[in-house]
Amino acid sequence: MKKDIETSDDKLDSAEALLDETELSAECRRIQSKYVLVLPKSEEVFNEDRPQEANRLGAELAVKTLSQEHTVGNKLRIKVTEVYSPFQFWFLEAKDADLVTEMSHKIFNFHSDGHGLCWMLTPHFLKPGYICAAFHQSAWKRARIVSVISATEVSVYMLDYGQSVKLPANQLNFLHKNFMQHPAMAMRGTLTDVYPLDFHWSANATNYFKLLVRGHYLYADIKDTDIEDRTLFVNLCVTPDTQLSISDQLISGKLAGISRNYSAKTIESNNGRRVRYIRERLPSFDMLEQQLIIADCEKFEDMFDRIVYNSQFYKLFKAPKLTNPFRKDLEDALADWLEKHKHRRNP
C-alpha cells in the first residue's frame, strides 16, 4: 500500500564516545563504530531541507466551487482536460484555461532561473497529500502526491487538469507559496441525455468520446448541478447554437442510448427528482482523483459492476468485503460513499 519514504541517516555519537579513547583498543573502536544511536529528525529539522518560500507539509489548496455562473440554463465555454467516461470528465472554463497556462509558464520560468537543483523535492516530502510542482508533458503543473510507489516513482493528481499519472520522483519540485493563491481549477463534468448501452460505458464509447472532446474547446449547456460534489451536468456542443451535440454523435454512432431523465415529464413523475444511473454516480470523482479505480481496464470494470449492481449495495446500502487486500482503500471509499448517499436512494 502507500508507504512514506523514511530518511534518517544523520547519526549521533553514542554516550560511550565520552570515554577516554586511549583506554579502548583499535578493535573496540572499530566495533563501536557499528553501533551508533540514531534519533528521528523532528519536522522542523526536515523543514530545513525545504526552501523557505516553499509549501510546508500539510498545506492545502482550495478547490474551485460552483458559483452563480454555474446555474441551470447558463452556457459556458470550456476546455476538456481529462476523461474517464462520458459520465466522468474534467474541464477548465475557457477563462481559467488561460490562467492555468500562464501559471505553468511562470512555474517553468521559476525553476529554470537558477532554482532547479535546490528546489528538487527531498525524500521526506514524498508523502501522500503533499502539494508540489510536477513536470509532465513538457510543462510544470501543480500536483498533489497520491501515493508513493517506490523511492523513485510516485502517483500524482494534476490539480488543474484532473489528470492522474505516475512520474519519476526526480520530476517533482517544491512549489513556491505564490502558486498557491489560486484554487485548483479543474472542474467536474457529466454528459447529459445519454446512457451506456451496457452495465458500464464500453471502451469504444469512451474512446470515441475522448476523441471528440479531450483537448478541445466546447460549449457546455448546464442542465443540472450537484453543489456538494462540485459537478456540472452538461450537454456539450461544438458550436454555441447547440446544433451539433456530443451526445447526438454518440447516439448516432450507436455507442449510447437516448436518456429521457432530464425531461420535465420524467422529473415530474419522480416527485421532482431526476433519475440518476448508478454508473453516473459511481465511481465517484473522489474515488477517481484518489486513484482507487483502475482506468482503461475492462476486467476491473466488470468487477466494479458486480459490486455496484448487487442488490446488497444499491438497495440495502451494504458495503462489500473485497477479497483483494490491496483494494482495502476502495472498500473503505465505497462504505463512506454509501453512508453519504443512503438518503439519496435511486427511484
Image: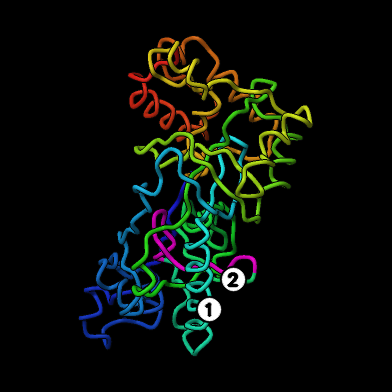
State the residue in front, 189 or 241: 241
The stretch drawn in magenta includes residue 130: yes
Q: Write down the residue under mark 1.
A: 108
In the image, is residue 312 above or below residue 179? above
State the residue in front, 166 or 311: 311
Local crowd at mark 2 within 10 Å, few (<14), some, or many (≥20)?
few
Hey, what amino acid is under mark 2?
Ala
Q: Secondary structure at mark 2?
A: strand
In this rendering, would 31 be left or right of 106? left
In this rendering, would 315 be left or right of 299? left
Q: Are marks 2 and 1 in contact (CB under 8 Å)?
A: yes
In the image, is residue 253 above or below residue 260? below
Q: Secondary structure at mark 1?
A: helix
Hey, what amino acid is under mark 1?
Phe
* Residues at marks 2 and 1, CA–CA distance in whole angstroms: 7 Å
User: Which residue does the image show at 67% across and 41% down from the upper left?
Assistant: 243
Where is residue 72, by image quadrant?
A: top left
State the residue in front, 171 or 7: 171
Q: Position of residue 67 (x, y in %)?
A: 34, 48
Q: Earlier in the sequence, mark 2 or mark 1?
A: 1
Q: Write down the residue under mark 2.
A: 139
In the image, is residue 150 above or below residue 316? below
Q: Position of residue 35 (x, y in %)?
A: 35, 68
Segment tinted magenta in the rendering: 124-137
User: Which residue does the image show at 50% across and 54% down from the upper left?
Assistant: 157
The stretch drawn in magenta includes residue 252: no
Q: Position of residue 34 (x, y in %)?
A: 40, 71
